[in-house]
Image (cartoon, rainbow, N blue to C red):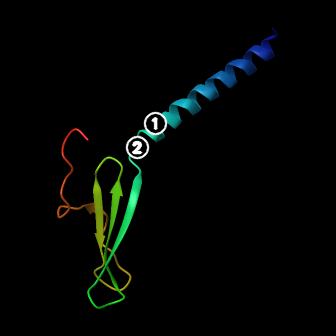
Amino acid sequence: MSRIQANALLTLLVALTGGLAYSIFLLKQPTVIANEIVWAPNSTDTKYHRLYFSDGTVMRREKYQDYDWTPWREDEDYPKPPKGR
């Protein structure tokens, strides 16, 4: 095997290993499994949004003006899932 072929093979192996490690890292991150939009009573205006993640975390943001939203934060009103799930 020539030196160029050996370098190409080594480069390919490093790229494949790095890609696999990055894929595993991404798969371990929690993903959004549901999005809930809650409407204000008797209105067509949204009150707040909730995002449900695969690890049980629930994030929420509220509307405080026409186009302004609060930053995403953990929802204290939503019950926490039991430990061990």
Residue behind mark 2 = 29
Please tell me which residue is depicted at 32% across the width and 46% down the height of the picture: 55
Q: Quadrant of the C terminus?
A: top left
Question: Which quarter of the picture shows residue 3?
Answer: top right
Please tell me which residue is depicted at 28% across the width and 58% down the height of the picture: 58
Q: Amino acid at mark 2?
A: Gln
Question: Which quarter of the picture shows residue 8?
Answer: top right
Q: Is residue 37 left or right of residue 9?
A: left
Provide residue 22's location: percent of width, then percent of height.
Answer: 52, 35
Residue behind mark 1 = 25
Q: Quadrant of the N terminus?
A: top right
Number of labelled discs? Answer: 2
Judged from the image, the secondary structure of the residue bearing numbered disc 2 is loop
Picture layout, residue 18 above or below residue 64? above
Q: CA distance from mark 1 to mark 2?
A: 7 Å
Which of 61 and 3 lies nearest the eye of the viewer? Answer: 61
Q: Is residue 4 left or right of residue 27?
A: right
Which of 76 and 54 lies nearest the eye of the viewer? Answer: 54
Provide residue 51's location: percent of width, then percent of height.
Answer: 35, 61
Q: Residue furthest right?
A: 2
Please tell me which residue is depicted at 56% across the width and 31% down the height of the picture: 20
Q: Amino acid at mark 1?
A: Phe
Q: Are marks 1 and 2 in contact (CB under 8 Å)?
A: yes
Provide residue 47's location: percent of width, then percent of height.
Answer: 29, 79
Label placed on residue 14: none
